[in-house]
Structure formats: structure tokens, C-alpha cells
Amino acid sequence: METFITQLFETPRKAPAATVYRAYEQECKKCNLTALSARVFYERIKERSGPNQTEAREGARAAYREQPWYWELQHDMPRHGRRPFEIVHIDHTELDIEVRSSSTGQLLGKPWVTFMMDAYSRRVLAAYLTFDPPSYRSVMMVLRICVQRFERFPQSIIVDGGKEFHSVYFESLLAQRSCTKRYRPWAQPHFGSVIERLFNTTNEQFLYMLLGNTQAAKRARLMTKAVDPRKHALWTLPDLYTYLVEYLYVIYDQNEHSSLGMSPPTGYAMRLYNGYRERVNRRETRKTGRNVTR
């Protein structure tokens, strides 16, 4: 039974369980053996179900949905760091909206946005909008915007395996600022769930409220000229960027985050204040030899 399950059922051919059982039953008859019942056969297949079986039949990406989540980057570090700017995520996505030229009115397509997000406080540190596909320029620009806004550079940056994160300019800047770069596992978005969730929230709360959003285009067979996003597109890149950063830096920033129980700026400020108190306490402890809390 185990041989037929592993060699016929758990293969990319994805043979039905009933077909595999019939082959197993016929082989038992040839060898003058008593075949186990179909119920036992199917129960054994069910017992073996899991990521390994799914990978054997459907591939690694299909099996990824069934794998457990591993949150911690290191065994001694919380999954989102201990303070703001300790762990930062950078990622790109193509926005679901059609954009026109501000000078000619010609349809230009969908722009790309690069987000930089603090994992601890969930604050959006920077956003950069462009028509260029992801490149080292987008990464350098979003870091520049972050330093302009907060006058700070992150301690570690989590990125995916994109080639833009392997550029000489990016590597040199991180080395100069003593910043650590960590890679998310390939094709495993759970490890970037903090920023992946931001993409979805931005679509639902901001982009899908604008004319020219491409929700209708996702179901091409049902789309008609009346709901074609290209017919309704009226936003230009500068105007879209202006309102996008207002949403991210003001509206999203002031709303209560479900995982924090408070707004991102509140969590950000509280941890900075607590960190200041901890430093003062350590300094006083070294001077006086006793624990002092202020």
C-alpha cells in the first residue's frame, strides 16, 4: 500500500485515489495477496496529507500554503524587533490604477510604488511612486525619503530576492551606514506579511475609491466598455502621489492598527520614550549601583 501511494499517488500526474487503489487491488490479486479495504487505503492517504504530499503532487508553491509560519528572524529576537528602526521592510508593487499624462492626457498605464515600513510600529516611513519597474533607483529614493522625514537610518532591512537589492549602490550605502540586509525566503510572502498587508490595505482603503482603478480588468470576460478602467482614468502621476502620501503619512498613520491596539505614531513614540527611560536607568545604575526609575 505504501509503495502504491508514494509511487503512483504522490506524483505530479495527480492520479485520483480511486485509480491508484484499483491498481493496488489488481497487483494484490496477481501476487495472491489479500488487498486492504478502500477505506483503509484512503485513510492512509489522509494520514500522509500535508506539505510534503502537496509538494509531490502540486509543487512547492502549492505546498507553501500548508507550511507553518516561522515568525522569528533569530531565536533571540522578536519577530518585529524591539524598537523602531531596528527592522524595516522594503518592497514594490504595481498599483491597480490607470494613470494619464499630465501634459498630453495620453494613457500611460499603471505605476509602481515602493514602500518602506517599520516592522515594530507599523509606520510607513517612506513611499516612492514611479513608472519605472523596480530598480536600484527606487530603493535609493525610498531610503532618501526616509532620511529626509526622520533623519534616521534603519539598523536592518528585510528585502526579497529581487535583483535591485543586489546593486552596488545599495550594498555600498548599507555598508557605509552599518546596516544589515536580510533576505526573505524565495516565494514565501508570509515572511513579509507586514508590508504585504500594507499593499492590500492601500488598495482597499485608497485606490479602489478612485476612478480608473483596475478591479474590473481582473475579470476580463465580464468587463465591458462602460466599466473599462482605461475609459475612466483621469489621475496623473503627480496628483496620485500627492494624495497617496497624504493617505499613508496622515490618514493611515492616525488610524488604530489592529495588531498594535493603537495608532502607529503612538506605538512609535511610546517605545522611543521607554527606550530613553531605560538608557537613563542604566546610566544611573552604573553611577549609583542601584536601580533608579524616572
Image (spheres, grey):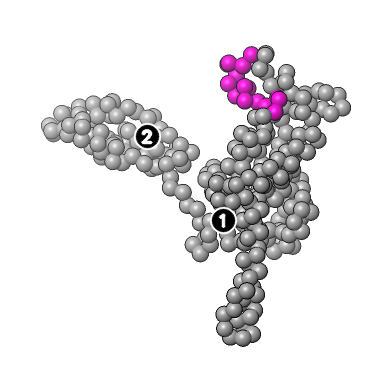
Amino acid carrying label 2: it is Thr
What residue is drawn where x is 65% and y is 25%?
214
Q: Residue 165 location, x and y as percent?
A: 67, 49
How many labels sit on residues?
A: 2
Q: CA distance from mark 2 to mark 1?
A: 38 Å
Apparent side of residue 196 relative to residue 41 in the rendered image (left or right): right
Q: Residue 158 location, x and y as percent?
A: 62, 52
Please tell me which residue lies in front, 31 or 58.
58
Secondary structure state at the residue bearing disc 2:
loop
Q: Residue 143 location, x and y as percent?
A: 74, 52
Q: Nearer the viewer, mark 2 or mark 1?
A: 1
- Pointer 2 local density, CA inside 10 Å: few below 14, some 14–19, many at least 20: some
**Residue 286 vertical placement versus 125 (above, below):** below
- Pointer 1 local density, CA inside 10 Å: few below 14, some 14–19, many at least 20: some
Q: Which mark is drawn over residue 11?
A: 2
Q: Which residues are magenta?
A: 210-224
The answer to which quarter of the image holds residue 228 is: top right
Amino acid carrying label 1: it is His
What residue is drawn where x is 63% and y is 35%?
205
Farthest residue, direction bottom: 288
**Residue 213 vertical placement versus 165 (above, below):** above
What residue is drawn where x is 32% and y is 33%?
9
Residue 216 lies in the magenta stretch: yes
Q: Which mark is drawn over residue 80?
A: 1
What residue is drawn where x is 70% and y is 28%?
210
**Residue 228 vertical placement versus 130 (above, below):** above
The answer to which quarter of the image holds residue 10 is: top left
